[in-house]
Image (tube, rainbow, N blue to C red):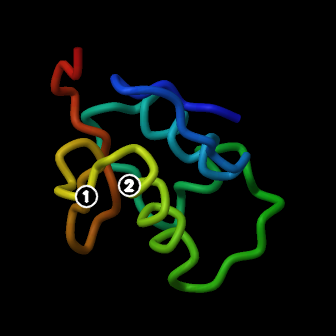
Amino acid sequence: IFYRLMNGLTRLTGLEFDILAALLRRAGRVIPRNALLAEAGRDDVIVGERTVDVHISRLRKKIGDDDQARIKTVRGKGYLFSKHDWN
């Protein structure tokens, strides 16, 4: 699965794509870490406590979000995708 960036394409795993899609569907709203995989339609994935964090970290690197401007960590709550206009 490919994600289009301003400077080209990057390859995402199926799970990374599903997480990104879930974040985009609820842009501007916090999704709790423990609910993110269910929001992504991935109840089939067996996870450890930090699994979502690892996938978010990999996703940030792939989409060039090292400064967490797009995918924000809301401490003690979960993650949100910023509603900022990225065009």
- Write the residue at 47% across / 54% down: 59
- Write the residue at 22% across / 36% down: 82
Mark 1, Cα crowd under 10 Å, few <14 / some 14-19 / many 20+, is some
- The kind of residue tagged 1 is Asp
Q: Is residue 76 left or right of residue 4?
A: left
Closest to the observer: 63 or 16? Answer: 63
Residue matched to label 1 = 66
Tell me which label, 1 or 2, sits earlier in the chain.
Answer: 2
Closest to the observer: 62 or 54? Answer: 62
Q: Is residue 81 above or below residue 53?
A: above
Mark 2: which secondary structure?
A: helix
Q: Are marks 1 and 2 in contact (CB under 8 Å)?
A: yes
Mark 1: which secondary structure?
A: loop
Where residue 6 appears, as percent x and y from the top left, is 34, 23
- Write the residue at 45% across / 50% down: 62
Residue matched to label 2 = 60
Mark 2, Cα crowd under 10 Å, few <14 / some 14-19 / many 20+, is many
